Amino acid sequence: MIKIGLLGCGNVGHIIATHAESIQVVAVFDIIPGRAEELAALCHARAYTDFDAFMQEDFSIVVEAASVGAVRCYAETVLRSGRDIILLSGGALADVEFRDHLIEVAREAGKKIRVPSGAIIGLDNIKIGQVSPPKKLLLRTTKPPASLGLPVTTRMEIFKGLAHDCIKQYPKNVNVAVALGLAAGRDIDVELWIDPEAERNIHEIFVEGDFGDIYVRVRNVPSPDNPATSYMAALSILTLLKNLENPLVVGT
Ligand SMILES: NC(=O)c1ccc[n+]([C@@H]2O[C@H](COP(=O)([O-])OP(=O)(O)OC[C@H]3O[C@@H](n4cnc5c(N)ncnc54)[C@H](O)[C@@H]3O)[C@@H](O)[C@H]2O)c1
């Protein structure tokens, strides 16, 4: 059974730790002591608020479900310790200098940085962009006003431009855009909409290339415990972990 260390005991962390079947959560880490202790009790793991002590535990993979800041702080140490890392806060990899450095560290350590599909579908075959660059690659994200704390009463576009620039204005809304860009091998166009009629976060992906065209629409059900996070993102990590040692690999 794969032993994991869980970095981040929030909404996604809870779903992972309490639904893990083919994995064992050995240790959990959070900057908020109460959160680590509560989750540790639920999944029979040990709780840590000290990162160095957490890293002394016996696990082979760290699952990050914390924040972009946590990735910047801890990912390099995780890789250098000889463990793989699964990053849900993939927005951290928008910083090209940081990303290239982390990839180099992983290469030197012979370890992997995995970015799960998270809140979207289709990341697998969008990778064909790496061998046949798409002519169009657009992510249109629509959110309810409350999720961005904006008092908007009619549907309106609040950002249109490259993902690279969206990150500067809406740093908490870029995990999906960064993952898509990394898969396709290029910066992507992003539209961010606020819609009072939207009850869910909606991600629409438009791709055109020599292969034809793609339209994907995902309407994310909020996590049962917290409407601010996507249930699909947590399921995506659980599925990645379930398949990690499977000899049959399906999908590009
Ligand atoms: N890729 C995707 O599609 C996708 C989807 C949903 C969430 N996310 C990302 O996953 C992460 C977790 O989401 P969530 O909804 O569970 O968030 P959350 O706020 O419910 O939980 C995050 C937890 O991590 C802890 N934490 C944050 N920074 C930390 C640090 N530096 N050191 C230790 N602990 C730290 C917090 O105290 C909190 O308990 C977020 O960064 C979110 O943006 C990505």
Image: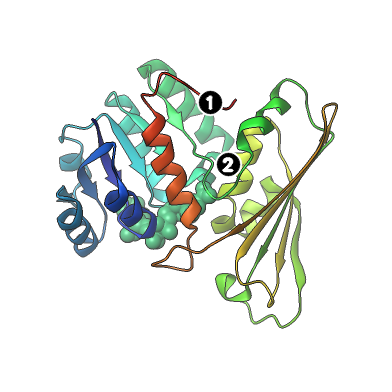
Closest to the observer, 37 or 101: 37
Q: Relative to 95, is 82 on the left or the right?
A: left
Q: Could you say whether the residue bearing mark 2 is in a helix, strand or loop?
A: helix
The CA span between labels 2 and 1 is: 27 Å
x%, y% of residue 193? Answer: 72, 65
Closest to the observer, 54 or 215: 215
Q: Is mark 2 within 8 Å of ligand 1?
A: no
Q: Of marks 2 and 1, which one's residue comes earlier in the chain? A: 2
Give the label on residue 250, or none.
Answer: 1
Color encoding of the figure:
rainbow
Tell me: residue 11, above or below residue 149: above
Tell me: residue 249, above or below residue 236: above
Q: Relative to 212, is 226 on the left or the right?
A: left
How packed is label 1: few (under 14 Cα within 10 Å), some, or many (20 or more)?
few
Tell me: residue 87, above or below residue 198: above
User: Looking at the picture, which amino acid does disc 2 mark?
Assistant: Ala
Q: Relative to 161, is 50 on the left or the right?
A: left
How packed is label 2: few (under 14 Cα within 10 Å), some, or many (20 or more)?
many
Q: For the N terminus, which image quadrant?
A: top left
Residue at 50%, 64% in the rendered image = 222
Residue at 42%, 39% in the rendered image = 239
x%, y% of residue 184? Answer: 68, 32
Is residue 88 among what the camera can see?
no
x%, y% of residue 94? Answer: 58, 41
Q: For the C terminus, which image quadrant?
A: top right
Q: Is mark 1 within 8 Å of ligand 1?
A: no
Q: Could you say whether the residue bearing mark 1 is in a helix, strand or loop?
A: loop
In the picture of the structure, the residue carrying the numbered disc 2 is 94
Tell me: residue 100, above or below residue 195: above
Question: Residue 23: which quarter of the image?
Answer: top left
User: Looking at the picture, which amino acid does disc 1 mark?
Assistant: Val
